[in-house]
Image (cartoon, grey):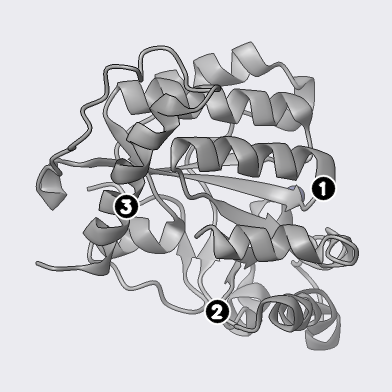
Amino acid sequence: MALAFPLSVAAALSARPAAVQADAAPPGETGAAPEAVLPPDDEMKLIAITFDDGPRRSTTTRLLDGLAERGVQATFFLIGEQVEGNEDVLKRMDDEGHQIGIHTYDHVKLTGLNKTDFDAQVDRTRSILKGVLGHNDFLLRPPYGMTDNGVKTWAGCPIILWSIDPEDWKDQNAPREVRQIVSEAKDGDIILMHDIFSASVDAALQVIDQLHAKGFLFCTIDELYAARHIDLEPGEVYWNAYP
Ligand SMILES: [Zn+2]
């Protein structure tokens, strides 16, 4: 029973009392018990929040600050060409326990490509990320969620889509996004957002506070599937981890 996952959730929980003391501690958290007791695996409501299209220094940094205050780890799917000049932001993500994935080099559809063009998007970005972070275990999220046999054959890693899409890029309306996500959220969902928009950062942090109050625990994609005893396989597509 001593899985890596409960340990990391325990770490997240133990970080929450610290958030209570922070200036930005959200109302409602002030009564948090200092010694949280973990429910059994099968009673935890788990959810993963994921961010595409970054890094963008201003908004991504503000998001990382907010996640750190709340003891939450997220998953980021990055654009390769935006890494240069933001290497410190990537290292911070990695150091603070967030999971990192590939979202192509310059945000093209991956379907219909030949192997050379696919590699110029995915393998090139994988090499860039490895050059900064020193490891090579990155997930893939294809732009627009579009996959075909070529994508599945050449991905070389699990392909992660989503089950909640507030279309935050469309109106950049934080209150609407928060209402939609909180009303849809279920155990095992994967939320799609974009950390390049200021409104999305506002919305994400409010969503985290509201779902914490409803008993959800936020985790990375790897943690979510580990908790459900599902092995993520290269080339396979995943939308959620419903119990
Ligand atoms: Zn995208």
Query: Could you tell which of marks 3 and 2 lies nearer the N-terminus?
Result: 3
In the image, 41: left or right of 118?
A: left
- Tag in front: 3 or 2: 3
Callout 3 secondary element: helix
At 83% from the left and 65% from the top, the residue drawn is 83
Can see residue 181? no
Residue 191 on image: x %, y % = 51, 40
Q: Amino acid at mark 3?
A: Ala
In the image, 25: left or right of 60?
A: left
Query: Could you tell which of marks 2 and 1 lies nearer the N-terminus?
Result: 1
Residue 224 on image: x %, y % = 35, 55
Residue 175 or residue 21, whichever sits in front: 21
At 56% from the left and 28% from the top, the residue drawn is 205
Say which quarter of the image contains residue 81.
bottom right
Q: Which mark is residue 56?
A: 1
Question: How far apart in space, not on screen, are marks 2 and 1 (Cα)?
Answer: 22 Å
Q: Which mark is residue 176?
A: none
Indicate if the residue with disc 2 has its beta carbon within 8 Å of ligand 1. Answer: no
Q: Which residue is mark 3?
A: 11
Q: Which residue is mark 2?
A: 137
Question: How far apart in space, not on screen, are marks 3 and 2 (Cα)?
Answer: 22 Å
Can see residue 56? yes
